[in-house]
Amino acid sequence: MLLRPDVIFFDYGNTLVKDTEDWFGDIARYLAPLGMELTEDRFRIGKAAAEHYAGRYRQKNGTRTRLEDRFWFNYCKAFLEAAFGEGAGRLAEEMHAVQFFTNEIYPDTHAVLRELRRRGYRLGVISNWEAPTLPSLFERFQITHFFEKILPSRDAEASKPDPLIFQMAMSALAVKPEYAVHVGDSFVCDVEGARGVGITPVWLNERGDAVPDGSSVLQIRNLSGLLSLLA
């Protein structure tokens, strides 16, 4: 049976574009013009400090990140100060506000989005994205015009799988959960998050991993696979 939603929501990273797998290389290339050499030891120490901050924050606040808490700024600040000393923390203001990680758009993204719009589907984005850079990335990859709503967690002040970010996206497009589909690569954030509010999830399972909870879930191996699930 084919799906016939009114609205299709998408995750961003590892769904519409391929996220970096080289954090060390990307941060090293960002810092080099600033005269800062990132060694592997400094990266390991900085990453551990940043993840420690993130863990403490989430233990206190759960999956919701409040805009006034400046989560991504503080994540970068923790990294810089642990890796290079307290004085390096001054760079966090710039570092968190620029896109220094490498993203590459998947080769089928444009074609799939064009076909979905041709079929009359309304499209939106629900993304866990704490930096203020997401709109510029959509412009860079020339995909902004496909979407009626692009909702990063920075604006929602909530991160998937928190129901709030899904509810805000549905409200923005005036769609009920039973008439929506959400496509994403994270089982916890995208599949369980969508299920939690009654949206039909489609898991973009590029590696063909086993379903973590053994449940039945619609799966695709790439974005083009979505077209065969839809009327």
Image (cartoon, grey):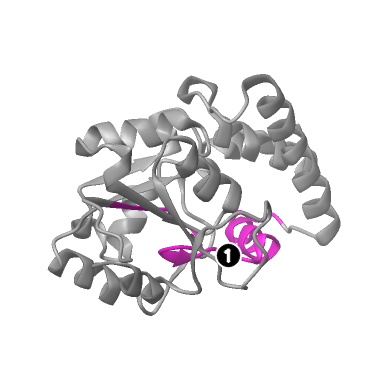
Counting every numbered tag in the picture gives: 1
On-image quarter of the C terminus: bottom left
Q: Does the magenta stretch include residue 25?
A: yes
Q: Is there any visible trace of residue 130 in the rendered image?
A: no
- Looking at the image, residue 15 sits to the left or right of residue 231; the answer is right
Query: In front here: 54 or 203?
Result: 203
On-image quarter of the N terminus: bottom left
Task: Please provide percent x and percent y for residue 167.
Answer: 36, 31
- Looking at the image, residue 79 sits to the left or right of residue 205; the answer is right
When the figure is inspected, residue 105 is found, relative to residue 85, above or below; the finding is below
Magenta residues?
8-36
Task: Please provide percent x and percent y for residue 163.
Answer: 46, 31
- Looking at the image, residue 63 sits to the left or right of residue 88; the answer is left
Task: Please provide percent x and percent y for residue 54.
Answer: 69, 34
- Disc 1, SS: loop
Query: In front here: 54 or 213?
Result: 213
> Which residue is at the far right?
41
Q: Does the magenta stretch include residue 158?
A: no
Quadrant position of residue 22: bottom right
Task: Please provide percent x and percent y for residue 97.
Answer: 46, 42
Quadrant position of residue 194: top left
Residue at x 52% of width, y 58% of height: 217
Amino acid found under the numbered disc labelled 1: Thr
> Which residue is at the far bottom?
107
- The residue that label 1 is drawn on is 20
Quadrant position of residue 60: top right
Q: Is there any visible trace of residue 54 in the rendered image?
A: yes
> Which residue is at the far front?
1
Residue at x 56% of width, y 37% of height: 72
Within-10-Å neighbours for mark 1: few <14, some 14–19, many 20+ = some
